[in-house]
Amino acid sequence: MFLETIQQSPTALVLAILQQDLPAGLRILRQAQLQHNQWRVQFRIIGESHAITLSYQHEVVFHEVLACVEVSPEHCTHYQPFRTLQDHHYTQTVVPQRQYSVQINFDPNPAWRIAEDSDPMIEFAFPNVGTLTPVTRIHWRMENQRLTWWTLHTYPHAGDVTYVHSRSQVNLEDVGNG
């Protein structure tokens, strides 16, 4: 299998942008979907991680997976491990003239504007680690044909918390209109 789960630790996280199918046995804890014209976006919380799938006209454009997984880089359009917890930014053209970008940040308060309470959201709270509760949360917002989604993953360990934020954006205008 090209995607194997491993120990849940922020230093084991990998950002993988994939175009092939995700494994059938993926453990989905929460999910939601957004339909916009001919675009469909699936938001999934998988363990302490996430998988977002962007489809156009019923065809998968890509999967964004931020997870503690062993993944073969040759199966990825983009592959970034986070062993040293360094911030990361990646941009690609996903369909003609449609840019997708993702940023990963390890600060408790990222520099970008985060989601608002009124934005749609899914969340999963895990069993406490001591007095701290690990959480995975996905928010999203459509504005002027641009979809933005934010994720938060918290990893409590030894009385401290490592925060992992991501922000992704893609233009969801229909391809013929751009």
Image: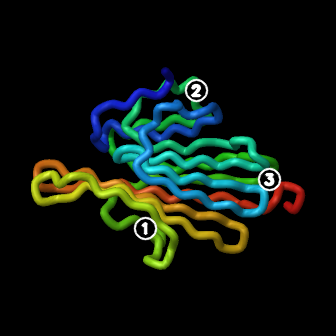
Q: Secondary structure at mark 3?
A: loop
Q: Kindly identify which numbered label has been placed on residue 75.
A: 2
Of circles 1 and 2, the one toward us is 2
Q: CA distance from mark 3 to mark 1?
A: 27 Å
Pick whichever of labels 3 and 1 is earlier in the sequence. Answer: 3
Q: Are marks 2 and 3 in contact (CB under 8 Å)?
A: no
Of circles 2 and 3, the one toward us is 2
The residue lying toward the viewer, choosing from 141 and 35, is: 35
Q: Secondary structure at mark 2?
A: helix
Q: Are marks 1 and 2 in contact (CB under 8 Å)?
A: no
Residue at screen point 46% across, 76% down = 116
Residue 51 picture location, percent across and down: 50, 46
Residue 123 picture location, percent across and down: 39, 60
Confirm whether residue 106 shows in the render.
no
Amino acid type at mark 2? His
In this picture, residue 176 sits left or right of residue 149: right
Could you say which quadrant of the image residue 142 lies in? bottom right
Amino acid type at mark 1? Ala
Q: Kindly identify which numbered label has been placed on residue 173.
A: none
Q: Which residue is mark 1?
A: 111
Confirm whether residue 89 shows in the render.
yes
Disc 3 crowd rating (10 Å Cα; few below 14, some 14-19, many 20+) is few
Q: Which residue is mark 3?
A: 97
Pick whichever of labels 1 and 2 is earlier in the sequence. Answer: 2
Residue 171 picture location, percent across and down: 71, 60
Residue at screen point 15% across, 51% down = 129
Q: Secondary structure at mark 1?
A: loop
Residue at screen point 28% across, 33% down = 7
- In the image as oriented, which residue stretches furthest toward the top? 1
